[in-house]
């Protein structure tokens, strides 16, 4: 039987075998995609969309544009040097009357108060009294109602509010602001706090990461070299923080570190201290508690890499004349670098977002950036500032991850 006859027998409808294989492969890919689609949707809804919304809130605020449309439109050509003309004051009076009638003057006051503290009550009183103004001139009447309207600062805020996008929140998050002429200037020293908070967050995270590495590396080496029965028992003890909530662990450290807690009482009984040491509500307690909680996150990646390293490598180095330390440093340690990099990176990123432990164990000078995000979210209800702080922290984390990955990533380890 000829080849043509065989193909015709196997493929009676005349569809090429190549096309059939492509259809089968396409169906297989669609089936695989359908299996992972629920996970993709879950990540999109619970992770990507909230992050995108946070990044948008950091630069988007259309409160003044939507609630004071006449005023923001009238200020479009204002140069910011002198007070606006009568047309802008007339538009302001109309917007204030409308806001008072629609009960939206509170939102306007809150938004302006972010940039001009104390302006909310003045805007509210101005809106109430503006209803009594029947005709112009509005400029003199509004300034007579409240001297606030005779200052360029308030008009600069209203002019910038004509755009639905603003850089105010991001600038304030790095201790900058707009002046009366909408120029970017530094905040007064008594109001500049966020640069120090970001630096403090970075320092604490690096300190905790270093402490966990110093504890985790020898412990991981011990677990990797001990017999399985003994190492499994020790591993259960190490993993105990995974089975207890962070809140409970932090509360336990509060009990241990207090003036008459177990640690102070033990140190005094051993005559190491003559009086209780200040271990609580300071940097020492914060780093100590965070190190305990984060230790498994650093240890497990290192341990998993160490378990995969064959003991024959060290034996071969020793047989070739290398000493114990030289064989360990030149043969064993470089193979541990991927686990060290993964563990340190995981711990560092988790530490950047710590909230409960610094709030309960740390003092006023130990609060990290997450505490301020919670403050603006739960108490101040300033979603713009909370989103800006979160966006800066996320951006800094991604940049640090990129730098860290280039310095000690997998490619660098292989080259070493």
Image (cartoon, grey):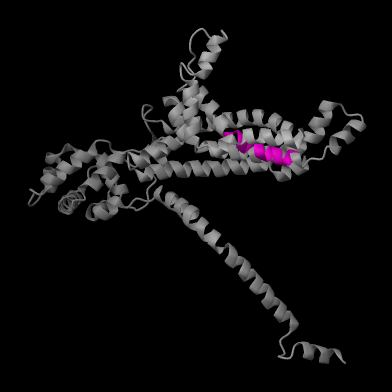
Q: Which residue is found at the position 25% from the left and 55% from the top?
A: 69
Residue 78 at what x, y percent from top left?
27, 49
**Residue 359 figure quarter:** top left
Q: Specify whether residue 304 is painted magenta.
A: yes
Is residue 80 visible in this depiction of the protein?
A: no
Left or right: residue 333 versus residue 316 is left
From what the image shows, is residue 101 above or below residue 255? Answer: below
Q: Quadrant of the N terminus?
A: bottom right
What's the magenta region? Answer: 294-306
**Residue located 51% across and 32% down the image:** 249
Task: Count numbered badges in the picture.
Answer: 0
Q: Position of residue 340 (x, y in %)?
A: 68, 37
Residue drawn at 55 percent across, 59 percent down: 39
Q: Is residue 140 left or right of residue 371?
A: left
The percent position of residue 406, horizontal first and vertical second, equals 66, 43
User: In front here: 183 or 190?
Assistant: 190
Q: Position of residue 343 (x, y in %)?
A: 64, 38
**Quadrant location of the C terminus in the rendered image:** top right
Residue 299 magenta-drawn? Answer: yes
Q: Nearer the viewer, residue 322 or 161?
A: 322
Who's the residue at 49% across and 28% down the image? 252
283, above or below 181, in the image: above
């Amino acid at each position: 039987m000829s080849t043509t006859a065989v193909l015709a027998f196997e493929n009676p409808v005349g569809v090429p075998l190549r096309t059939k294989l492509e259809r089968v492969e396409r169906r297989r890919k669609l089936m695989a995609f359908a299996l992972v689609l629920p996970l993709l949707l879950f990540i999109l809804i619970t992770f990507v969309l909230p992050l995108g919304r946070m990044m948008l809130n950091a630069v988007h605020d259309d409160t003044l544009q939507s609630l004071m449309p006449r005023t923001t439109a009238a200020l479009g050509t204002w140069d910011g040097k002198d007070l606006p003309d009568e047309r802008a004051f007339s538009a302001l009076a109309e917007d204030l009357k409308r806001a008072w009638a629609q009960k939206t003057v509170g939102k306007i006051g809150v938004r302006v108060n972010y940039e001009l503290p104390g302006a909310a009550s003045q805007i509210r009183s101005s809106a109430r009294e503006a209803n009594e103004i029947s005709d112009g001139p509005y400029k003199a009447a509004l300034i007579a109602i409240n001297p606030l309207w005779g200052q360029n600062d308030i008009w600069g805020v209203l002019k910038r509010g004509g755009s639905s996008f603003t850089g105010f929140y991001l600038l304030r998050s790095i201790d900058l602001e707009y002046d009366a002429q909408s120029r970017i200037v530094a905040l007064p020293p008594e109001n500049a706090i966020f640069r120090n908070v970001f630096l403090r967050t970075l320092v604490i995270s690096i300190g905790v990461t270093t402490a966990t590495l110093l504890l985790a590396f020898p412990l991981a080496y011990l677990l990797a070299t001990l017999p399985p029965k003994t190492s499994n028992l020790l591993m259960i003890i190490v993993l105990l923080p995974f089975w207890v909530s962070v809140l409970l662990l932090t509360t336990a450290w509060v009990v241990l570190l207090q003036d008459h807690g177990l640690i102070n009482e033990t140190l005094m009984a051993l005559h190491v201290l003559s009086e209780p040491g200040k271990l609580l509500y300071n940097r020492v307690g914060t780093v100590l508690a965070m190190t305990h909680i984060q230790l498994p996150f650093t240890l497990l990646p290192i341990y998993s890499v160490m378990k995969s390293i064959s003991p024959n490598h060290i034996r071969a180095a020793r047989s070739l004349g290398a000493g114990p330390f030289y064989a360990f440093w030149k043969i064993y340690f470089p193979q541990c670098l991927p686990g060290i990099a993964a563990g340190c990176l995981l711990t560092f990123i988790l530490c950047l977002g710590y909230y409960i432990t610094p709030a309960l164990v740390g003092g006023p000078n130990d609060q990290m950036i997450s505490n301020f995000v919670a403050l603006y979210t739960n108490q101040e209800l300033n979603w713009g500032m909370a989103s800006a702080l979160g966006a800066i922290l996320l951006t800094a984390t991604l940049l640090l991850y990129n730098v860290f990955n280039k310095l000690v990533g997998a490619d660098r380890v292989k080259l070493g």
